[in-house]
Structures are given as C-alpha cells and as structure tokens.
Amino acid sequence: MKKIFINKNKQLRSGWKISLVLTLSFMIITGLFYILRPLIEGNSLFLIMGIIQSIVFIKIILVMWKLLDKKPFSDMGLTPIRGNYKQLVIGLVCGMLSMSIVFLVLLMIGDIKLENSILAPNFHPTILIYLLLFTLVGFNEELFSRGYCMTVLKQTGNKWVVLLGSSLIFSVLHINNPNIELIGLLNIFLIGLLFAYMFIRTGSIWMPIGYHITWNFFQGNIFGFEVSGLDVLSVYNNKLIRSNFINGGLFGPEGGLLVTLIIIIGFVFVYFITINKGAKNEFFN
C-alpha cells in the first residue's frame, strides 16, 4: 500500500505532489470565490478573482515545493531574474510578434475585419488591470506546468512522461474553456511542449513566462481575439467574418491551424537562438 504513495527513493510520488497542489488551490480559490461573489459585480469579479487565483496558486506551489522537495527554487527553473532578464525579454518579444503575425495574416486573408481604425485605438484604464492579470497568469501557469510539474515528474525517470505529462496537464486545465474544440486542445498541448522546450534549452522558465504573457495580452487586449475562448476588453475590435479551421472560430486563433504553424516555427526559432550560445541544460540529469 505504501508504494502507491512513496517511490523507491522514498519520495512522495510526483502524481500525488501535483494532485496536492491542484486540490489545495481549488479548495482555497473556490472558498474565496463564494465569499467575494456577493460583494463584487460583473466583469470586476472575473478580474479580481483572476488576480487572486494566480497569487494563491503561486504561493501554494512555492510552499509545497519547499515542504515536499526542500530544494532551491532555481531547481524548478525559477532562477534569479537578474541573470535571466534577457530570456524574459526574448519571450515577451516573441509572444508579441507571434500574435501580431496571426492578426495580420487573418486580416489579409479576410477572415477578420477591423471594426475601428488602427489610428483610433480604444484605450481604457481597465486594460492595465488585464495586463497585471495576464502577467500573473503567465507566471503562475508556467511556474506550475513547466517549473513544478516538469521538475517533479523527473522522479519517474522517463523523459516522455516529463514532456508529454506536463503538456497534457496544461491542456486539461483549459478543457472547460468556452467553445473549445479538438484543434484548440491540440494547440494548447503543442504550445505546452514549446514552453517545455524553452525551459529545457535555457534552464529557466523566464522565456516561456514572457511568451505566455504577451501571447495572451496581445491576443485579447490588443487585437480583440478571444483568449482560449474568453472574451476580454481590447484596444482594437475585430469581427470574425467566417469561422474555419484556420482561424479557430469562436474559440479564438488558438483553435486554428494558423497558430499550429506559428508554434512549429517557434520550435525552430528557439533551437537556433540557443544552439549558438551553448545553451545545453542538464535538465534530465
């Protein structure tokens, strides 16, 4: 019976560690939601709960890492930002450029139409709160899915479990998003693999954090797409002219094959920007 919970190295099995983090987070966040729901109305509840949820999730991950693994945070890719800010900047720029390419391509092929002029953006102070939200979301999802899950799954001694398992968890966390379909789930799985590849090649989670932040922010709050099926306030409003497997339909571009292509290009780009810098991380050793 003990073997169900403890492995041969006398460690709590990785699956139980991940389950504990998710269960504790769910219980605390659900409790806070029911406390705050009568006090906050409309879209403010979504924003405030999103920020609180991210902070709670981050705190639980860090506490559980120290309690169960008793290792430095750098062992799960949370290296000091001072020495890794370039990786963060590269991620931020890549996420912004990737989503800008998606927007321009869909605009040029006529799948979307811009409802307000490029020269007439709809700036609103609330967008700054969304920037904070997506910054925290990018940080907490990468800290969990890449930093925590990939590192504890190394206990299995199987590279494929580490890579595929962490990406599967990442995609399952989005399974209840509105209007999600098969291509959307596959793309979220693939982008999880891309973020895992960034982690392995650089030795830190700062590049995937940066990419994740601007990917979401530019997708939703700048270009007006749904973010994994969620509608958010945006600087530019676009209208979907036709829904198809290229643009992702109501789920947003993450549900389309154009994003699949962008993700594949991302793998190639990460390979080339790290190979010449001797970026060989001993992640699996």
Image: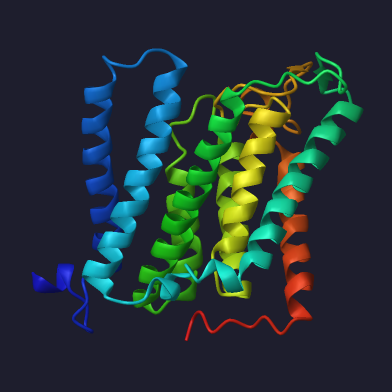
Quarter of the N terminus within the rendering: bottom left
- Vertical order, 132 against 79 (above or below): above
Return the residue found at the far right. 108
Return the residue found at the far left. 1
Residue at x-position 21% and y-position 71%: 12
Colour theme: rainbow
Residue at x-position 78% and y-position 63%: 269
Residue 281 placement, left or right of 57:
right
Question: Which image quadrant for residue 201?
Answer: bottom right
Front residue of this view, candidates 283 and 5: 283
Residue 56 in percent (x, y) is at 32, 45
- Vertical order, 27 against 47 (above or below): below
Residue at x-position 23% and y-position 24%: 34
Q: Is residue 248 visible?
A: no
Q: How many marks?
A: 0
Front residue of this view, candidates 24 and 257: 24
Residue 25 placement, left or right of 262:
left
Question: Which image quadrant for residue 48?
Answer: top left
Question: Which image quadrant for residue 99?
Answer: top right
Residue 83 placement, left or right of 246:
left
Residue 125 in percent (x, y) is at 60, 23
- Vertical order, 41 against 101 (above or below): above
Residue at x-position 45% and y-position 58%: 143
Residue 131 in percent (x, y) is at 58, 36
Q: Is residue 29 visible?
A: yes
Residue 80 in percent (x, y) is at 51, 71
